[in-house]
Amino acid sequence: QVQLVESGGGLVQAGGSLRLSCAASGLTFSSATMGWFRQAPGKEREFVAAITWSSQTTSYADSVKGRFTILRDNAKNTVYLQMNNLKPEETAVYYCAAKRRPWTSYDYWGQGTQVTVSS
């Protein structure tokens, strides 16, 4: 059974930083593409960042480019999202996701971790 467990969320002031972690089990992590998504209250879930199995390719939503960094450690089966200069409008539940092939949709999702950015 695949499990994705996010951690690292919390309350931070605008301009602050947080690092989210997502620990994966039950899948071949080293070959999976990993992604981060977020969903704010009353809004649809949106893409934040993704990283391929080798870390060779990363992609970001335009709104987070230059402030967020996605990283992975295949030895620890963990993907990270370093978030800097956070904005109040980025308050949301952040979800980790995994897919077995880069060209498919995401197969697995975590339960999410709350990030609250105060102004």
Image (cartoon, rainbow, N blue to C red):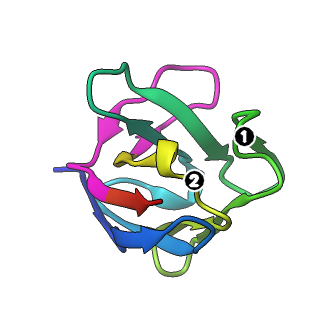
Residue at the image position 83 percent from the left and 55 percent from the top: 66
Q: Which amino acid does the dot numbered 1 rest on?
A: Tyr
Q: Secondary structure at mark 2?
A: loop
Residue 70: x and y, percent? 66, 59
Residue farthest to the front? 119
Find residue 67 and report its image quarter: bottom right
Residue at the image position 44 percent from the left and 42 percent from the top: 98
Q: Which amino acid does the dot numbered 2 rest on?
A: Lys
- Mark nearer the N terminus (2 vs 1): 1
How far apart are the alpha carbons under marks 2 and 1?
A: 16 Å
Q: Is residue 111 on the magenta stretch?
A: yes
Residue 30, compared with residue 17, is above or below; it is above
Residue 56: x and y, percent? 83, 54
Q: Tell which of 41 and 74 is nearer to you.
A: 41
Residue 50: x and y, percent? 63, 43
Q: Which residues are magenta?
A: 96-114
Q: Does any portion of residue 70 appear in the rendered image?
A: yes
Residue 69, compared with residue 96, is above or below; it is below
Residue at the image position 58 percent from the left and 40 percent from the top: 48
Is 32 on the left-hand or right-hand side of 77? right
Is 102 on the left-hand or right-hand side of 18? right
Q: Provide the residue designation for mark 2.
A: 87
Q: Secondary structure at mark 1?
A: strand
Residue 60, compared with residue 119, is above or below; it is above
Residue farthest to the left? 1
Question: Which dot marks residue 5?
Answer: none
Depth check, mark 2 against mark 1: the one in front is: 2
Residue 41: x and y, percent? 27, 31
Question: Which dot marks residue 60?
Answer: 1
Is 56 on the left-hand or right-hand side of 106? right
Q: Does any portion of residue 26 appear in the rendered image?
A: no
